[in-house]
């Protein structure tokens, strides 16, 4: 997987940082190498939700596409969960039949699954659910 791909909404499959054009799950490494501590915190706040390697793999194998509007909704859902004190949340994106397990504290998507993978599953170790 190439981490230096440019973001093109019509062709995107993976969420990408809008500021740098790099895949979101790899942003911490790049931030630590080139910026001051203040810039690191600011960059992480602006970048929003990150995706784990496992979540990225699930998105790729499930051919799941997230556009900019989806990422904004996801960020908003994570912020709402954080305001309510959630730590691990299930985010259900009903318009594209997608479930995302998110570490709210770390603002990281742990795993993703489409409608077919959701059937007959039990979601454990979550303390909240947000339906978008």
Image: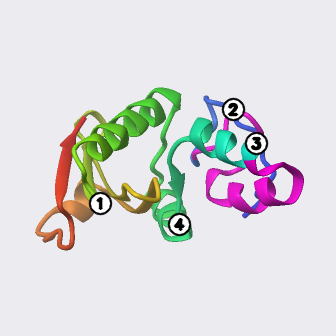
Q: CA distance from mark 4 to mark 3?
A: 29 Å
Q: Which residues are magenta?
A: 15-37
Q: Of the residues tagged 4 and 1, which is closer to the observer?
A: 1
Q: x and y percent of residue 27 in the render? A: 70, 54
Q: Residue at x 24, y 55 (%)?
A: 90
Q: x and y percent of residue 73 in the render? A: 38, 32
Does residue 27 show up magenta in the picture?
yes
- Could you tell which of marks 1 and 3 lies nearer the N-terminus? 3
Task: Provide the residue designation for mark 4.
Answer: 57
Is residue 53 in sight in this rendering?
yes
Q: Are marks 2 and 4 in contact (CB under 8 Å)?
A: no
Describe the element under mark 4 as helix, strand or loop: helix
Q: x and y percent of residue 65 in the render? A: 48, 43
Q: Nearer the viewer, residue 32 or 5?
A: 32
- The picture quadrant where one finds residue 114 is bottom left
Q: CA distance from mark 2 to mark 4?
A: 19 Å
Task: Provide the residue designation for mark 2.
Answer: 8
Q: Are marks 4 and 3 in contact (CB under 8 Å)?
A: no
Q: CA distance from mark 3 to mark 2?
A: 26 Å
Q: What number is the disc on residue 39?
A: 3
Q: Of the residues tagged 1 and 3, which is closer to the observer?
A: 3
Residue 109 relative to residue 101: left or right: right
- Could you tell which of marks 4 and 1 lies nearer the N-terminus? 4
Describe the element under mark 2 as helix, strand or loop: loop
Is residue 97 in sight in this rendering?
no
Q: Residue at x 62, y 30 (%)?
A: 9
* On screen, residue 104 above or below 39: below
Residue 84 relative to residue 45: left or right: left
Task: Provide the residue designation for mark 1.
Answer: 87
Q: Of the residues tagged 1 and 2, which is closer to the observer?
A: 1
């Amino acid at each position: 997987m190439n981490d230096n791909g440019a973001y093109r909404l019509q062709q995107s499959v993976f969420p990408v940082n809008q500021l740098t054009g790099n895949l979101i799950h790899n942003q911490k490494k790049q931030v630590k190498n080139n910026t001051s501590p203040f810039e690191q915190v600011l960059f992480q706040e602006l970048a929003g939700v990150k995706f784990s390697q496992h979540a990225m793999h699930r998105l790729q194998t499930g051919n799941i596409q997230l556009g900019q509007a989806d990422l904004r909704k996801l960020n908003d859902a994570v912020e709402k969960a954080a305001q309510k004190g959630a730590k691990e949340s299930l985010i259900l994106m009903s318009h594209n039949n997608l479930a995302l397990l998110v570490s709210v504290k770390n603002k990281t998507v742990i795993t993703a699954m489409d409608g077919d993978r959701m059937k007959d599953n039990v979601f454990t170790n979550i303390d909240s659910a947000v339906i978008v």
